[in-house]
Image (cartoon, grey):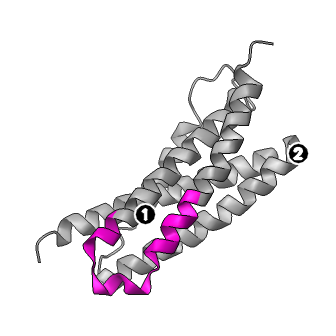
Amino acid sequence: MTGVRELTTYLNDHLAASAGGLALAERARDAQRDEDPELARLLAGVTEDIRADKQQLERAMRAVGAPINPLKPLAGKVGELVGRLKLNGRLLGRARLSTLLELEGLTIAVQGKRALWLALGELDDPRLRQVDLGRLVERAEDQYSRLEGARRRAARAVLADR
């Protein structure tokens, strides 16, 4: 079947991104526990959604017979760790920009996940009927909406000339 290798690679790449996104969401949530409890609650919900979406991705992979490359999720987590090493004006601890950058990373990740679900829907593959792709698209749009509002508030708080 044409595209099998490409589909497997595509799904594993998204699985890597999912692992990195989950690690980023957990880190952002934990950082906000004392700093901004309302944002921490929002991020806790998004974190659980991302975890559930990752499970749905793994389910889709099993359904189409795409083997999981164990190195891909590890690469996603390592990528998230490397992202912490950026020069942000602080050697230790969180910089004022940290929250904004984390929220931007999460909004970008959620848009990528939405694109994945839409791409899988284009396949019209009967093996994927056990995965509710329409619901996953809706959940990604909801996640984006919640994160984008928080991102915009963070941008005003951090970037405003005060």
Which residue is nearer to you in this view: 72 or 123?
123
Q: Quadrant of residue 123?
A: bottom left
Q: Which amino acid type is shown beneath numbered disc 2?
A: Asp
Mark linked to residue 24: none
Examine the structure image and report whether residue 134 is included in the region drawn in magenta: yes
> Which label number is shown at residue 15?
1
> Residue, x 36% and y 76% (percent of image)?
61
Residue 80 or residue 58, whichever sits in front: 58
**132 left or right of 153 in image:** left
Between disc 2 and disc 1, whose residue precedes? 1
Kindly identify the residue that appears in the image at 49 percent across and 75 percent down.
56
Residue 111 versus residue 150 in the image, above or below: below
The amino acid type found where label 1 is placed reads Leu
Instruction: Decide: few, some or many residues near mark 1? Use Cα within 10 Å; few <14, some 14-19, many ≥20.
Output: many
Marker count (numbered): 2
Work out which quarter of the rendered image holds the N terminus and state it. Answer: bottom left
Cα distance in 3D space between marks 2 and 1: 31 Å
Query: For residue 73, which quarter of the picture?
Result: bottom left
- For the C terminus, the quadrant is top right
Q: Left or right: 81 with respect to 133? A: right
For mark 2, does the 10 Å Cα neighbourhood hold few (<14), some (14 to 19), or many (20 or more) residues?
few
> In the rendering, at what x and y percent does residue 152 appear?
67, 35
Range of magenta residues: 119-141
| Residue 42 percent location from the top left of the image | 75, 55
Q: Which residue is mark 2?
A: 34
Query: Farthest top residue?
Result: 161
Q: Residue 21: where, in percent of width, then height?
A: 55, 54
Q: Position of residue 119 (x, y in %)?
A: 32, 63
* Viewer-proximal residue among 139 and 88: 139
